[in-house]
Structures are given as C-alpha cells and as structure tokens.
Amino acid sequence: MDEISSIFKQLRLPGMDQCWQSLIETRRADGMALRDGLLLMLQAESEQRKENRNARLVKQARFRYQATLAETLFDSSRGLDKNRIMEMATCGYIKRGIPVLVTGAAGTGKSWLATALGHQACMLGYKVRYFNVFKLFEQITDARMEGTLTKLFARLADTDLIIIDDFGVRSLDKQQMLDFLELMEDRHARKSTIIVSQLPVANWYDMMKSNSTAADAILDRIVHTAARFELSGSSLRKK
C-alpha cells in the first residue's frame, strides 16, 4: 500500500494519493472493483487540479478585496438584481468580449461586485487581472521607461478579464488617454473589461477631454455595447 502511495507522489498525483489513502483508511479498497476505484481516484485528481488551478488564477488576479457571488447581498432596489448578476456568473460576457460598467456613489458595493464577478471568472478557468487605475498607469509608465511596453500590452491583451477600479477619480492626461485607447482597442470585442467608477458614464467624456479624439474612440468601444450596473443607496461601509 505504501508503494502505491509513493508512486502517486512521484508522479505528482496528490488527488489520487489522497483518495487512495481514504479508501485504505475506510477499508473500501479491498472490496471495490478495479474500474470503480480507478474512476473514483481519477475524479479526485481532476477535482484537485481544478482547485489548484482556481487558487492560482485568484492569486494571479491580485484582487484588492476578497469577494464572491455567494457572499453578495442581492437587492434589486440598490441595482444588485440577483437574476441579472447570476446570469453574468455564466461568464458569457467574457466569451463575447462584452465590457461591463459598474457605477455608483462611494460605498455602494461597486468594487465588491466587480471582484465577485472576477472571482467567479477565475472559478471557471479564465485569466483575470485587477487594477486600481492609478497602479495601471504607473505600470504602463514603468514599462515604457524599461522598454517592455510592447510585452505588457501583449500580456494585457491576452487576459480574459481585466478589472479597472476607481476610474474617473482624476482626469487622464494625453499620454494616458493614448495608452488607454490602445488597451481598449486591443480588447475590443475580444476580451472583456470591467470598469468601476463613481462618475456616471455621462460624465466620462469631461474626464477624458484632454484628447477629445481619443475620448470619442474609447467611449465608442466601451459604452454602446456594455452591460451596466448602476448601484445606489446609502454606503454599506457605514454598516
């Protein structure tokens, strides 16, 4: 028995090893048909690999918060309609490259909802990356200085879902506008982007007016086809 467990470890099959140990401890191994035992161990290994993959995707996403849809307090009066959000949980919007805009006053749960959707995407095997908008542009600036900007944009373009939080807290300068346009152009109709903002979408143009041509192009790519969540109500942080 120890030899079988040792082979599982050598082959890096922790799920099968754990299942095998359980069968031994519960005295089920001797009385189980080979086919049934093998199927049970293969299922355990598959589940273990899925859990490991999900944990790795969540870690790589670098979420600011820990939030899941299971913990979300649905309230249609606040803009958190359960049926609509659970429809988003299938991640069909990611497959179709549809952007998502989450707006509302501070404390209404915007970042929570965006993070919960991002976590759900990780559970379904999608590559996700969370950014505070200031950190995003800092990373782009650093990459430009280091000569790695092309690689950074290629990596961002390949990410299934990008979450950009705190969008619109301050106006974007001309270079930031061009960088943001390139990012949106790379992702348009291919990959999904969730943008979180306290500003109503109607005010976004004013925040980007340093380059009106780029502003028109950006809004054209993210506003008209986007799924929108406009959250309202008193701040949940007070509770």
Image (tube, rainbow, N blue to C red):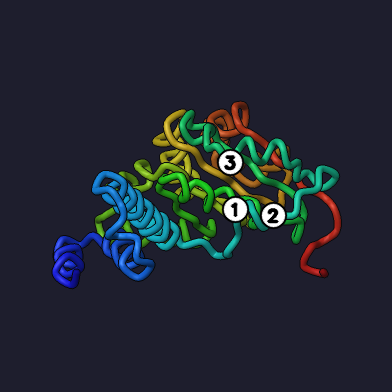
Q: 174 or 51, which is in the foreground? A: 51
Eyeballing the image, is 107 above or below 209? Answer: below
Q: Quadrant of residue 216?
A: top right
Q: Are marks 2 and 3 in contact (CB under 8 Å)?
A: no
Residue 116 bears which disc, if any? 1
* Secondary structure under the numbered disc 1 in the rendered image: helix
Taking the image as shown, residue 165 lies to the left or right of residue 60, namely right
Q: Which residue is mark 3?
A: 89
Taking the image as shown, residue 239 lies to the left or right of residue 200, namely right
* Residue at figure coordinates x 73%, y 42% from the top left: 82
Around disc 3, counting alpha carbons within 10 Å, would you say few (fewer than 14), some (14 to 19), or many (20 or more)?
some
Q: 49 or 28, which is in the foreground? A: 28
* Secondary structure under the numbered disc 2 in the rendered image: loop
Q: Quadrant of the C terminus?
A: bottom right
Eyeballing the image, is 19 above or below 167? Answer: below
| Kind of residue at badge 3 | Ala
Residue 87 bears which disc, if any? none
Q: Which residue is mark 2?
A: 72
Q: Quadrant of the N terminus?
A: bottom left
| Kind of residue at badge 2 | Thr
Q: 120 or 181, which is in the foreground? A: 120
* Residue at figure coordinates x 76%, y 41% from the top left: 81
* Secondary structure under the numbered disc 3 in the rendered image: loop
Lower position in the chain sequence, tag 1 or tag 3: 3
Q: Is residue 152 visible?
A: no
Lower position in the chain sequence, tag 1 or tag 2: 2
* Residue at figure coordinates x 64%, y 56% from the top left: 111
* Residue 29 at x, y percent in the picture: 29, 60
Q: CA distance from mark 2 to mark 3?
A: 12 Å
Lower position in the chain sequence, tag 2 or tag 3: 2
